[in-house]
Image (spheres, coloured by chain):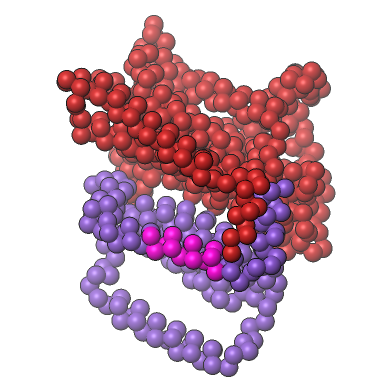
Amino acid sequence: MIAVMFFVVAAIVLGGAFGVVLSPNPVYSALFLVATLIGVAAFFLMQSAQLLAAVQVIVYASAVVVLFLFVIMLLGVDRREGLNDPRPLQRPVAIALGVLLVIEVVALAGHNWATGTKSQVAKLHGANIDSVARALFTTYLWPFEITSILFVAAVVGAVVLARRSGRGAPVEDTRAEVTS
Amino acid sequence: MSALLRGPLAVDPLFLGGIDWTVFLIVVVKTIVVFALLLLSVLFYIWFLRKVIADMQNRVGPNNAGKFGILQTLADGIKLFFKEQSIPDGAEKPIFRLAPYLALIPAFIAFSIVPIGGVVTVAGHVTYVQLVDVPIGILVLLAMSGVGLYGVMLAGWSSGSKYPLLGSVRASAQLLSYEAAFGLSILAVLIQSGTLSTRAIVQHQVWSGGVVAGAQWHGWSTLGQWFIVATPIAFVIFLVSAIAETNHPPFDLVEAEQELVGGFLTEYTGIRFAIFFLAEFMNVITMSAIAVTLFLGGPAGPGLGFLARNGWVNAWIVPVFWFMAKLLLLLFGTVWIRASVPRLRYDQLMNFGWKYLIELAFLWLMVTAVIRVADDQQWDFVNGNRGLTIFVVTVAAGVGAALVYGVLMLCIPRGDELASIEEWD
């Protein structure tokens, strides 16, 4: 039963991944990405990592991809594009890196940490929220906090850069919207 | 199969004895009953809404189909079902067809975590009157409200027309903005209850004298355990942001007729149009049910004392009755708001969400956390009176939070001040 579910979900994940790369329309790509991400969440569930599964759906499958779609729709790049790339070197480099990635994954799969056994913590605590929270707020508190500061800095930086370059129209637009 | 199900569903006693055909059948029947219940609730809610609003506006409202016009929604549904469905030429057809279901399915899944009744025994199996009780409970709601956004967004985009697109872009901005305050208000409850499971949250609210039972009533004193008493501000924030999350008036800018024709629904006709409305009203009912679960003690309420405590009336009917009564109260509130509050302007919506609600939710979360820590660490600096200590801590944290909020409000620019700030670079 679990094997059957594994192959069904694996087919969804891989199909979604191919869909992301092959579909000519960016909106379809984003939707295939959602299928892949939800499939990965199902894998997490099979491994009894329920919190990770929920976070995967909340953060990636909804918030992140919705932002992708938001940008795609706002910038109006939601039309079909050909797969012809004007830069000559990009395709061979991409293929080389892809092959490297496949070799890496195959090599890593042989290591003993990729055993496929289920989380032991989940059996004790139901959903592994306790252990994740404890790890985040005790052992890895500093990396966690520093990463969040990094994210805030990145967001502020993006806003500043966007406003610097776009002295004209965008600023006018926001003002009209906010003060009207 | 049993090993797989034991992971996410271990809490429901139904699965403890392994999975056989009876258990499987119970799950199937539960699913069908909950889905039918939700559909019937929508039919009833739309009739209720039209009747109450009509009453508030001195009109009669629907009164022809059935007694008191109660079959009006059914008639409307049948009419929409048999209508011709049109698809615009410029539409992205597969996605245009898919979008209504992307809105409907998450709306149903989100309701599945709501505890409707107590603990019952069916054919020798003990089970909850609730579809599933997952350990990650309330996170399912957050995930589904996020996924449900795709329906609205893709409907607007795939229509290939400008007003639906504007409507769906508005919808996504609105949902992302209020998701933060929504999550923070739920967090305040989670800090109090220490669990994500919806049933455990209900049990925490009816806890009394060390007895934890499934939605049993422990006397009127347990009213104080309801989270509406423990975190009242979180309740208000939850209601406001839930109304915004469901695109319910006064936050229904997504389908503002004066500005956007019909918003993301403009190009939809027939049954697809009906499915969107079904999903929207399902979401209103789900959010109200979640509010009952999180803040109002779910199905807890006084039983009929003269009947056996675990008899079929007290086990089956009384909890469901209390759940429905509380739900109806909140649903009446949503109708009242719909009838009386005018729609917000887009900038008001964004200002309110980002500048006031999120800050308030954060500060309230901090106050709740302080109270929880004081309780857990058994703080005691008022001569052995722990109740008084907690009270002092609460007041101190509340005053501190109010000061911070006041300073924040003074710092936030508004109106004409904002225009001058725009010149900073």
The kind of secondary structure the magenta stretch mainly shows is helix
Q: Is residue B193 at least partly visible in the picture?
A: no
Residue that appears at 46% across and 31% down: B233
Residue drawn at (51%, 60%) of the image? A64
Identify the hue of chain A: purple
Q: Quadrant of residue B71?
A: top right
Image vertical order of residue A137 relative to residue B342, above or below: below
Q: Is residue A68 above or below residue B166?
A: below
Residue pictured at 70% horizontal, 72% vertical: A79
Q: Name the tint of chain B in the rendering.
A: red
Say which quarter of the image contains residue B370.
top left
Extreme residue in the top direction: B306
Q: Looking at the picture, how far across and down is residue B329, in whole percent?
A: 57, 22
Q: Among all residues in the image, which is located at the extreme left?
A: B384
Query: What residue range appears in magenta?
Result: A149-161
Coordinates of residue B356 in the picture (x, y in percent): 53, 40
In magenta segment, residue B295: no
| Of residues A114 and B127, the one drawn nearer to the viewer in this rendering | A114
Q: Is residue A153 magenta?
A: yes
Location of residue B292 with respect to A14 vertically, above or below: above
B340 left or right, relative to A10: right
Q: B308 or B21: which is nearer to us?
A: B308
Residue in the image at 70% along x and 22% along y: B52
In x, y percent, where is residue B228?
44, 26
From the viewer's perspective, tell me whether residue B337 is left or right of residue B74: left
Is any part of residue B288 visible from this angle?
yes
Please state, as top left, top right, bottom left or bottom right, where the C terminus of chain B lies in the image.
bottom right
Image spot of residue B113 (x, y percent): 46, 39
Q: Quadrant of residue B50?
A: top right
